[in-house]
Amino acid sequence: MIEIFVNDQSLHVNEGVLLIEALIQNRIDIPYFCYHEALGMDGNCRMCMVGIEGQKRPQIACDTIVKAGMRVHTTGERIEDVRRRILELELVNHPVDCPICDQAGECKLQDFYMDYGLYDSAVSKGEKVHGAKHVDLGANVMLDQERCVLCARCTRFTCNITKTHELGIIGRGDHARISTMPGRKLSNPYAMNVVDLCPVGALTSKDFRFAQRVWFLSSTPSVCHSCAKGCNIFIDHNAPKYQKERIYRFRPRRNDAVNGHFICDAGRLSYKSLNDHRLTCNNPDAMDRAKALIQAAHNIALLVDANLYCEQLDALVAFAQRIGAQLYCPNQCYYDEGFGDEWLRRPWRAANLAHINTLGITQSTPSEAHDLIISFNHPDLSSLTCKHKIAFSTHEGVEADVVLALRSWAEEAGTLINITA
Amino acid sequence: MFTFTPQNLQKIEALKSRYPSPNALALPLLWMVQEQEGTISLEAMEAAAPFCDLPPIELYRIATFYTMFKLAPTGRHHIQLCKTLSCALCGKAEILAHLQERLGIGVGEMTPDGRFSLEQVECLGSCGTAPVMQINDVNFENLTPKKIDEILKALS
């Protein structure tokens, strides 16, 4: 640890870290486009200028390594003037289309303009250099070349993280722009992360654009249930006027121990199934009929879904003991070998299989000796034959003697145990 | 299908030993493609990429960055008129107007028969003999409208 001084405040930081990292970790405001904690420094946007005592000119914080005793200033007339001028150049060819831009409300360009800009532009007021609008890059990603600030986060993501090399900056000067090779598409299972990485409205998600203004959304921290990895996410949801609460998108939530800054596209889009075809209200006599069926049954099988939370599974184990039922969680329906990869995707497509293992629940199909199957949202129920069935289900379309509505995982709180390997 | 000629393949082998990393071959490879085919097609970039151990998008970035790489076909006689200071002072505008009138095309265009294309470029390094133009690889100096007529006639 070494000591540095930022705006005369003493900070203890690790030796060898970048100044911008030290500032971000200590929550000191610093504007930047191109730096990203997952992608590292690039030094192209020049927004993170700071004053360092003993240095003639302002320096970029993302390309400065901290030194013991360094005295740094992130505020002051001179620094703010430099930032204002850099921002002015970033905005020369930027369209003023915030009212129709999906990034509005979570746009760094907007934020920084409000923080540091607020100028009358001194740069030519002539025709701007126009770029292509709504270019479909593939993988649900739309590009607006005019809005781009050329921070190269997206190209660095496809180059260094996915190593799929679809995107690049082509041309030069005013005409430099993001593009794929003509005729090729952005296509990798993590492509939609570039939408989150984009600090401005240049890359937007085809799935989310024009669906909702971001300031109407509430974000709830959660964990993706699309596979056993347990990537941390934010669920962005809202109840539009006269409508039920809907989920509009999943976004990755940083957790360095699990998923870092990213999630896969399949997980990101898995929110859709939580909105539609939901089973919502129970038949008033359903509980009584279920009770009668349980009392009349001699040999009960209790089928549990591997996406239930630990607390729910523990309660179901107790319930099974009480009614003398045998627990099952047939697991073949969760296995998709093609889905797994070396990074975030796991072939087991259920969130809590580890706890099913811990509880020692039988992971094969129930024998035909049972005269009643009670299913807690297990996907295999329809394919099993049994004299009587009771289904607790989150979604419609389940065939059973009695069907009861269950809250989805997004509507419950609980614990999951992931499989990281 | 684009393939390098055997001579170019030999050249590539010879060049490889000159650089510490095959990445450095990107520019020479693009030049070879252009010399061989006249233009650099996407197909050729894809074919050249493995030789320099780069993804095709990197070659595409380089090819779009440098104006001397041609991604679209040019005329058989590609006229490049210098627009930098010395030539501009010595009557480039008049030469350009004359060229456009004689060829019936604007800057960046090609005659319908594919014989001539016209482009303005930065300094051709011959300021002492301005105005200058280059047709393919040959410089023409001290241009006047009359001289242009003679040059074009000789090329017809």
Image (cartoon, rainbow, N blue to C red):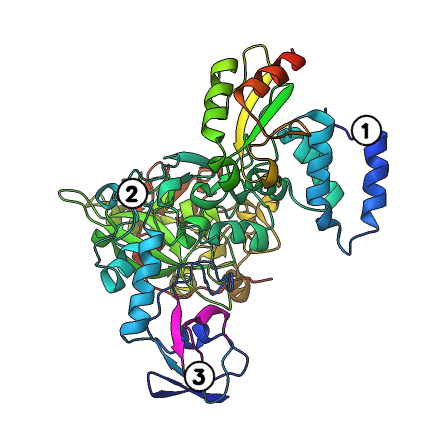
Q: Mark 2 highlights which residue?
A: A95
Say which element carries label 1: loop
Q: Is residue A188 magenta?
A: no
* Kind of residue at badge 1: Thr
Depth check: A89 or A17 in front? A89
Q: CA distance from mark 2 to mark 3?
A: 39 Å
**Disc 3: which chain?**
A
Q: Earlier in the sequence, mark 2 or mark 3?
A: 3
Label 2: how many Cα within 10 Å (few below 14, some 14–19, many 20+): some
Same chain shared by disc 1 and disc 3 = no
- Which quarter of the figure has residue A107? bottom left
Tell us which disc is closer to us: 2 or 3.
Answer: 3
Relative vertical location of residue B140 with respect to residue B51 in this rendering, above or below: above
Distance from Cα at disc 1 to Cα at disc 3: 58 Å
Q: Amino acid at mark 3?
A: Gly
Q: Is residue B155 above or below residue A187?
A: above
Mark 2 belongs to which subunit?
A
How far apart are the two marked residues, 2 and 1, measured between alpha carbons?
A: 47 Å
Residue A330: give x, y in percent of width and height: 53, 49
Q: Pointer 1: what residue?
A: B5
| Residue at x 66%, y 14% (from the top left corner) | B155
Q: Residues within 10 Å of mark 3 (few under 14, many from 20)?
A: few
Q: Position of residue A6 (x, y in %)?
A: 37, 83
Residues under numbered marks 2 and 3 in contact, where contact means CB atoms less than 8 Å apart: no
Residue ID for mark 3: A54
- Residue B146: numbered disc: none
Query: What amino acid is found at the position of numbered circle 2 in the picture?
Result: Pro
Q: Position of residue A27 (x, y in %)?
A: 35, 75
Looking at the rendering, the stretch of residues picked out in magenta corresponds to A48-64
**Which residue is pictured at 75% across the width and 54% down the height?**
B21
**Residue at 66% over, 27% down:** B136
